[in-house]
Amino acid sequence: MSSRRFRSWLCAASALGCASIALACAAAGVDPATGLVITADAITTPLAHGDAARGRALLIAHEDANCILCHTITDPAIRVAGNIGPTLDGVAKRLSVGQLRLRVVDMQRVNASSAMPSYYRTAGLDRVADTYQGRPVLDALQVEDIVAYLATLK
């Protein structure tokens, strides 16, 4: 079953009040907020097939991802970057692809006090802009594009 299909099924089961199903999913490592399987501190199964070039473009653009608002990265296309989060230079040496994926999907799952937004989670969020109510900031392909690019930063 695909993660998107499973997520829809999980939401429907939760809406029907199937607490036992939700508990069983939690025991199996399925995150009820995203419908994705989380193992330790990683999401090992890709959400889609990512492309590093598209991921770089998303990262550099000051739009939905807006990674450089908080993170620095050595790239000639980036003149100004933030310093709130850790540098993205060498991130693929520090984290596995699965760990990168979880951090993009829902960094608050890793660190509840993180200022980094949850780019794929839609449930249980506070202070969500109207344009993102009920939808993720990044879709599955965009998440994987960014993860593919971050995985090149060794």
Image (cartoon, rainbow, N blue to C red):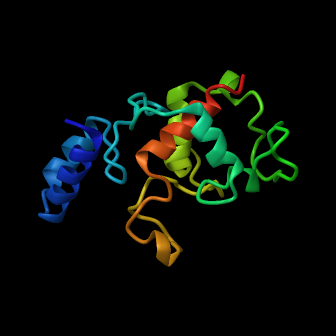
Q: Which residue corresponds to the image point at 74% horizontal and 51% vertical from the top-left?
A: 68
Task: Pick the residue in front: 110 or 75.
Answer: 75
- Which corner quadrant of the image does residue 121 belong to? bottom left
Q: Position of residue 38 (x, y in %)?
A: 39, 36
85 displayed left or right of 147: right
50 displayed left or right of 19: right
Q: Which residue corresponds to the image point at 49% horizontal and 38% vertical from the top-left?
A: 144
Task: Pick the residue in front: 84 or 133.
Answer: 133
Could you tell me how many numbered marks the image carries?
Answer: 0
Q: Position of residue 135 (x, y in %)?
A: 40, 63
Q: Quadrant of the N terminus?
A: top left
Seen from this angle, which residue lies furthest bottom?
Answer: 130
Q: Can residue 109 be seen from the camera position used here? A: no
Q: Quadrant of the C terminus?
A: top right
Q: Which residue corresponds to the image point at 57% horizontal and 24% vertical from the top-left?
A: 96
On screen, residue 108 above or below 28: below
85 displayed left or right of 101: right
On screen, residue 92 above or below 147: above
Q: Which residue corresponds to the image point at 55% horizontal and 44% vertical from the top-left?
A: 104
Q: Position of residue 138 (x, y in %)?
A: 49, 53
Task: Pick the residue in front: 49 or 81.
Answer: 49
Q: Can residue 65 be seen from the camera position used here? A: yes
